Structures are given as C-alpha cells and as structure tokens.
Image: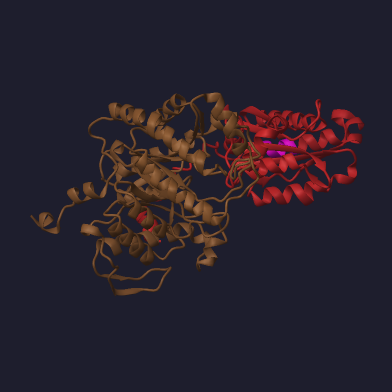
Chain colours: A red, B brown
Amino acid sequence: MSTRTLAVVSAGLATPSSTRLLADRLTDATVAALREHGVDVGVEVVELREHARDLADHLVTGFPNAALRPVLDTVAGADGLIAVTPIFSASYSGLFKTFVDVLDREALDGAPVLLGATAGTARHQLALDHAMRPLFAYLHAAVVPTAVFAASEDWGAGGATGELGARIDRAGAELAAAIAARPAAGPADPFDDVPDFTALLSR
Amino acid sequence: MQFGVFSVSDITPDPTTGRTPTEAERLQAVLRIAEKTEEVGLDVFALGEHHNPPFFSSSPTTTLGYVAGRTQRLQLSTATTLITTNDPVKIAEDYAMLQHLAGGRVDLTLGRGNTGPVYPWFGQDIRQGLPLAVENYALLRRLWDEDVVDWEGRFRTPLQGFTSTPRPLDGVAPFVWHGSIRSPEIAEQAAYYGDGFFHNHIFWPADHTRRMVDFYRRRYQHHGHGDADQSIVGLGGQVFVRKNSQDAVREFRPYFDNAPVYGHGPSLEDFTRETPLTVGSPQEVIDRTLGFREYVGDYQRQLFLIDHAGLPLKTVLEQLDILGEEVVPVLRREFAARKPAHVPDAPTHASLVAARTTPLEVVA
C-alpha cells in the first residue's frame, strides 16, 4: 500500500460543529474508498477556528506566523483536500475565505478537492456551485463532480443509509479515485524552479 | 563589518501625541539623523526611494549629496533605488555624480518597488517588474563599466555611441547590492554578477531570510565568484533600545501598535518572537543581532531601522547615542572575533580600486 496525505479543512465555529461533522463523514468515506484502491492515507485535520487570529495577523503582516505556517504547508503538500464551510450570507464564511486568501497561488494547482457546506436550511445549497466552485476554479484545483451540502434537516433524514449518506459515499469515492490516479505530491520548494540568470537575461 | 541605519522616509503621525510632522520637518529630521549616524561612530546611512505619500524621499541622490557635504567618512547608500521605474541611464548618471561628490563613499541597493500605481506614473508596468530589473541592471552595468555603449532592449529607446557622464570615480563603479524580500530571481541576479545581496529581514520570519541568503550564497559560488561564505550579505534589523528592557517596551508599544506595515495585528511580543524586531536593553539587542549570524553566516553589513512609525527626532537621536555607545562597539568586537580570515569585509571604494585588475594585467 502506498501512503498519501489527505488534508481536511473545516471552517465550523461551534463545538460540536455540524461543519466538522460533515467533514469527518466525508473523510471517513474517502479513507474507506482509498483503501479499496490500495492506498493508505494519513489524515491532517485543520480547524480554522483555532487559527482565526493567526489568519488575521497574516492579512496584516503579510506572512504566516509559526502556528499557521505548518498548516499552509500541510494543505499545499497534501495529495487531496476536503474543504467544508458553513454558508454565511449566501456564501462561504469570511474565515474560510481568509484561509483561501493566504494560501499560495499554486498551493492547490491540479489538486483533487472535495467541497462541502452546511447551513440551517436547504435554501443555501446552491452556494456550493455559485460560490465554492468558482473559488476553487480560480485556484486551478481539480474539484470532484459531487459536492456535498448538509442542512439541519439532512441530519435527521435516514442517517447513513439516507440521501446524505449516499451523497457522502459518492463524493468520497470520487475524491479517492482522483487521489489514487495521481502520483504522490511532493513538498514544494520555491527555490527549485528559479531559472539560471543567463536564461533570465535572454528572455 | 559595517553598521548603520536605514530610513524609509515615512511621514507618520506620532501616536502618543496625534501630531504628524510636516514634510519639511521630517526631511530636516532625516538629515540630522544622517549626520548623527556619523557622529556616534556608525558606518552607513541608507535612504529609501518613494514616489507617493506618506513618504518624502523621491530623490535620494539629492539628499545623500547634501549628507555627503556634511560628513567625512559616512558610507552613503540607498534602501532601495528603484531599478524598475528609473531610467538606468539616469541611475548611472546620478549615482556617478554622487560618487564623485562623496569622494567614493557611495554604494546603492537596488529594489523593484512593490507599489503598483508607481510603475505607470513612470511609464512602466508592475507585471514586468522582474524583466525590468533584469534588463535595466544589465544596461546600468554596461554604462558604468564601458565608456561607449551601443545598446538595444525592450524597455527604453536604443543607445548609439552613448557615454554616461561623469565616468565612475577612478574608473570604479559604486558597489551594488540587490535587495529582495521574497524573489529568488533577484538573489540569483546578485549572485550572477558577484554583487551584494541585501535582505530587508525586518517584518519577516528569520527562516525566510535564512533560505533567501542561503540560496544567494550557493548561487554566488555556482557563478564562480568565490566560496559561498565569501559572498557579500547585508541585513536589515529593527530595534528600540533603552537602558532597561521594560522601559523600552513601554515606550515603544504605542508606536508598534499603530505602525504602518504591521500595526493593529500581532502583539509586540508575538511580532518580536516571529521577526528580528528587538525591543529591549542594549544587551538584548546585542544578543539578538549576534544571533543573526547563526542563520545567515558571517555577513558584511547590518543596518537598523530606527526612525519609522512616527518616533520623534529626539527619541531617534537618543537611539543613535545608545547604539553608538553601548551596542555597536560590542557588536564590532564580537562579530570580528567570530569571522574567519577568508570572509571579506563589505567592499568600499578603496577596496574596489585596490582590487581592480587593469586590462593590461589581464593581457599579461
């Protein structure tokens, strides 16, 4: 079995959080599906709430502090990402967007990504397609076809065998297939790509 | 090793009084700071270049020309000279003029400038920042090193039979440092030419500086200018020092909390931990500064930022007194004791003249 890294970013604010609950369900489904592909995966969960101040500091200072740097490195170096946000005011939360804003522009280039969102009612579900997908399209991420939305009512609708559970399994299988189909991601080194100066001079 | 100060020429309200100095006051204050830098025994005064408020220093060679006339041994430099939006012909002329006026006490640090609107004000485009830095410097080098230049490039009108005047003093161009916070290409440029690399260092984590300097040093050796540890490195630093650490923290905190760049973000304590900012006693500044050597190796120039964020002139001059009396003499001694003999000092006009190989000797 080869070993990969799956990063999970949850922007939920409450404890316990339905956003984190959805993230965990998506994670379990992806890990199980990866196992069927013969891929062992290490899971790194990032709770953005714990980095709310670090993210605000990054906006002001322009660099990630010692607590935030390894988080950004984890996401940039992962073989796949599950990103789940609560829907606030018709879109992803500000905390979630701040995290995306401080990611390196190339951090998710070509990376398999599974999107999830939660809200109080199903009326917000199109935010996944109208807000989340364009954001990750900008980042050149390879977003899997199924994105999973969970409103309050979904949590009581038939449990793991119901509609939500089926969507979670389908999304997890799609992300697992995308991860298994790609070579393992290596740590990115910005100094690897610097052209020799003679090449810069002749441009 | 050279020690000095650099100013970005910001005009910032003093948060403890709410008063903003006038342009005239701040300009005069910077002149006084420059003179004081020599009086207290430091080596270098460097001034930034900006073309937008709240900065005043649009014409650093004018200011440095005045300072040259008021000082005897102070090395004059920039932090930085914009290699992107200035015509390299004008840089060649202006800094050769300054070099003559100052009797050779001039070097300069090139930077790209990160303010988007400034570029179109000078007919350029920030998206071309890197190609501009590459082409303009290639031309600047030739204008100083060759008496008659034929040239054609992408960004300015061609030159036919052009001679930049005055020719560099004693036929030796001012030493050039290349400053960059995060562009490895600029470190590569410095390494390619065997020039100095200056890392602003302040406002950023030390590990970032370490990686940039390490890359420059490796590439310096790759391009055949000497061993990696013989490359020429300068660092910025930011300090606020009082006899007692607690007094320094208490006095500096309102300036920190409201400072441009990092104010209203991390706490003073967080930022001190994350970046080279040091607020404390002379001994704390000494220990921290000596610690820079641990991650960049033996280096040639240390410049401190001491006059930004609205600090009043009186306070800045007191900072210079403390640096000159209690900090820098110790740093000189301690850095010298640690530096191996094969690591060079920062180039000066005298050392560059002495090291010059004439064409005749090359033939021989």
Task: Give x and y (percent) for residue B188.
Answer: 38, 48
Q: Nearer the viewer, residue B314 or A36?
A: B314
- Within the image, what quadrant is residue A103 found in? top right
- Within the image, what quadrant is residue A73 found in? top right
Examine the structure image and report whether residue A88 is included in the region drawn in magenta.
no
Q: Which residue is drawn at 23% across and 32% down?
A: B341
Q: In which quarter of the image is the C terminus of chain B?
A: bottom left
Q: Residue at x 11, y 54 (%)?
A: B361
* The residue stretch that appears in magenta: A171-176
Q: Residue at x 31, y 59 (%)?
A: B141
Does residue A2 appear anywhere in the picture?
yes
- Residue A57 vs B82, above or below: the answer is above
Does residue A70 appear anywhere in the picture?
no
Q: Nearer the viewer, residue B208 or B270?
A: B270
Examine the structure image and report whether residue A173 is included in the region drawn in magenta.
yes
- Is B356 left, or right, of A16 in this rendering? left
- Within the image, what quadrant is residue A59 found in? top right
Q: Nearer the viewer, residue B94 or B282?
A: B282
Tally of numbered tags: 0
- Residue B100 vs B251, above or below: the answer is below
- Is A147 left, or right, of B22 in this rendering? right
Q: In which quarter of the image is the N terminus of chain B?
A: top left
Task: Give x and y (percent) for residue B172.
Answer: 24, 56
Task: Give x and y (percent) for residue A3.
Answer: 57, 28
Task: Give x and y (percent) for residue B221.
Answer: 29, 42
Q: Which residue lies furthest to the left in this view?
A: B364
Q: Residue furthest bottom?
A: B160
Q: Label the magenta part by its dominant secondary structure.
A: helix
